[in-house]
Image (spheres, rainbow, N blue to C red):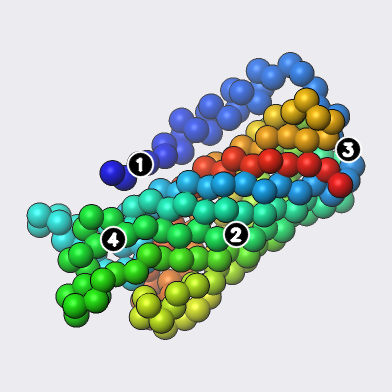
Amino acid sequence: MKFTFNALIYSFLFICLGSAANAQINVPDSVRISIGAELASTTGTDFGTGTNTPSGGTAASAYNNGVGISLHVDVPIMSQFYVTASAGYITFLTSKDAGSSQQAVTGNNLANFNTIPLKIGLKLLLGNRFYVQAEAGETILANKAALYALYSNAFTWTPQLGLVLPLKKRHTYIDAGIRYESTQTFYNNTNVNSFWALRVAYAFNL
């Protein structure tokens, strides 16, 4: 079953939690590493190939949900301002409607949509808990041949909101964020692959 993210509700939740937090985090001016798990929910009905899948006469997406892992590096350039770099692996799972996709008509099962996003960007801490971040880069399609794609990489951009929560061990944190990510087509069309993602990570300072 497809799960969805309501952008306004999550944004409001993060802002409220960040504003309500009274405890202060002494974030050292050093490189921060985070390793996290991700859950994703695609938007629209044409994620992937750009071909709508009919389900009972109604267009439905061949891909609804995704899971992944990611590594983020934050390098401070001034107080509360970081240059970021990230790499990950996200696989978007075929939905129950994938069987009637364009590829399935040829007698081949539609493969999962496996991506490797590589991005750089900027992060600004607002206070000691709440942050805003923006990144851009390239997403590599890991199984191009299985998906009959024309291109193996495409431009990607993403804004993100997040919270940094301290753990008992000094200079370790839980980094939780929600983002919207958009990737250009891997096919010769105008399709855009976009999704909402929730990331929860363990972070530490070097």
Name which residue type carries label 4: Ala
**CB within 8 Å, label 2 to label 1:** no
For marks 3 and 1, give the CA distance: 37 Å
For marks 2 and 1, give the CA distance: 21 Å
Work out whether 5 lies above or below 45. above
Q: Disc 3 designates what residue? A: 28
**Horizontal and vertical percent for residue 7?**
46, 38
* Secondary element at image label 1: loop
**Mark found first going from the N terminus, 2 or 1:** 1
**CB within 8 Å, label 3 to label 1:** no
**Mark found first going from the N terminus, 1 or 4:** 1
**CB within 8 Å, label 4 to label 2:** no
**Mark found first going from the N terminus, 3 or 1:** 1
Name which residue type carries label 3: Pro
The quarter of the image holding the N terminus is top left
Where residue 155 is drawn, which disc sits there? none
Q: Is residue 85 left or right of residue 50?
A: right
Q: Disc 2 designates what residue? A: 88
* Secondary element at image label 4: loop
Q: Disc 1 designates what residue? A: 3
Q: Can residue 4 be seen from the camera position used here?
A: yes
